[in-house]
Amino acid sequence: MKIFLKYQLKEYFFYTFSFFFGFSAIITLIKGIFTLQKFIELNPSLFHIFAIFILIFLQFISFIYPLSAFMGVIFTIYRLKDEKELLAFYSLGFSLKDFLRPLGIFMGISFIITFVANFWILPWTKRTQKIIKIDLIKKQFKRPFPAKKPVPLGKIYVLYVKNSQKKGDIHKFEKVFLFKKTGEKKMLFLTKEGYLSVKDNIFELDQGWAFSLNKAENIEVLKFKNYKFLVSLKELAKIPYFTRGEKPFLELKEELKKIPPKTSRYYRYLTEYYSRILYSFSIIFLILQAFLLGFCLRSSHKFLIFFIGIVVYLLFYLTYQFLVSLGENGRLYPLLSFLVFYTSVSLLLFVQIAILKKKKGGIFL
């Protein structure tokens, strides 16, 4: 029996981590490229770029591992059926209950991995990414602005200069291109020289032209000797505000106590609070569903098995996200939204188990 137990666990973990590394590589690469586009304008070092990709990998463990475990169990049962090993085990006297012990151990280990990833790692990675971004912004103010490269200034300005120097708190620019975009119009400033005072948030342009385009597509041209305006830079260097998904559990709990009950913000925070605890239980239901689905699927095409597995997984989590969103909106009490989901999934699993019991030995064929 110990040999059977080790053999089953080995198969589950082999397929699970095969899928895990494959999904991780694809998702981390795609998400990393999109995230890096937001950081690249801040001149991150190679260390920061490497750290960002590592943080993204860690951030998605709570999503990728459940998917991998789900697909791993399906493909384990599929291989055992396809190679007639299930039929051999049944001939030796093994029943469906004998397969539940290794599955239960696998569930327990997977639950711990998912809980750690969702409860601690996920909020920590989100928080750390924001801290890195703020740190890069602060460092950018302490050194000359990069030349021949677009650099955002606050939310509505983008700066491009040919040469840049820094003396104290003053940044001096040569051959300046400054783009400003608001809801009403767009403006482009072209000047020989420019000065930015980080301390006073004042941008000064000397001897240049300004071109503006409004919603009616009317163009205005302005020639000036000196032009000054304020840019909001100090807010970027302040201590960042962390959202509910970026807060550690104890900090989230303390923040929840300060929010007035029955408000939209209260429901969002309360949903996040319950999600940190209850999300991990979803992998138990997922693995059991994968186990039952593996016995039910009858196909010689691996791609079809993979496609069905992905569809079932997406339906599972789309339903989960839908009910959780009802809790966030206050249409259902947050705890009730989780209970409704897990109760519904439990009833569906009991129906499948009852159907499989009627088949008896037929499920091994």
Image: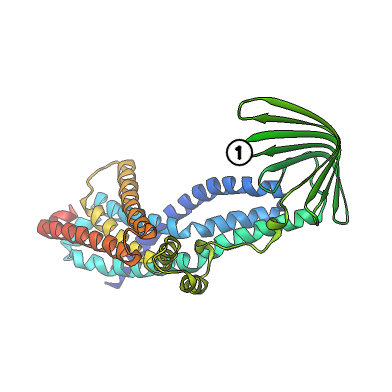
Please name whichever residue, 281 or 22, is drawn nearer the observer in this view of the structure.
281
Disc 1 is placed on an element classified as: loop
Task: Please tell me whether residue 214 is drawn above or below residue 8 in the rendered image.
Answer: above
Please name whichever residue, 316 or 175, is drawn nearer the observer in this view of the structure.
175
Image-based side of 2 in relation to 188, left or right: left
Residue at the far right: name it: 167
At horizontal 39% and vertical 61% (from top left) the residue drawn is 13
* Image coordinates for residue 97, horizontal then vertical, percent: 20, 67
Amino acid type assigned to the residue bearing label 1 in the image: Gly
* Image coordinates for residue 253, horizontal then vertical, percent: 47, 73
Q: Residues within 10 Å of mark 1 (few under 14, many from 20)?
A: few
Image-based side of 90 in relation to 315, left or right: left
At horizontal 46% and vertical 68% (from top left) the residue drawn is 119
Residue 205 picture quarter: top right
* Image coordinates for residue 124, horizontal then vertical, percent: 55, 65
Please name whichever residue, 77 or 140, is drawn nearer the observer in this view of the structure.
140
Which residue is disc 1 drawn over? 183
* Image coordinates for residue 110, horizontal then vertical, percent: 39, 66
Task: Please tell me whether residue 63 is drawn above or below residue 261 in the rendered image.
Answer: above
At horizontal 77% and vertical 34% (from top left) the residue drawn is 189
At horizontal 25% and vertical 59% (from top left) the residue drawn is 345
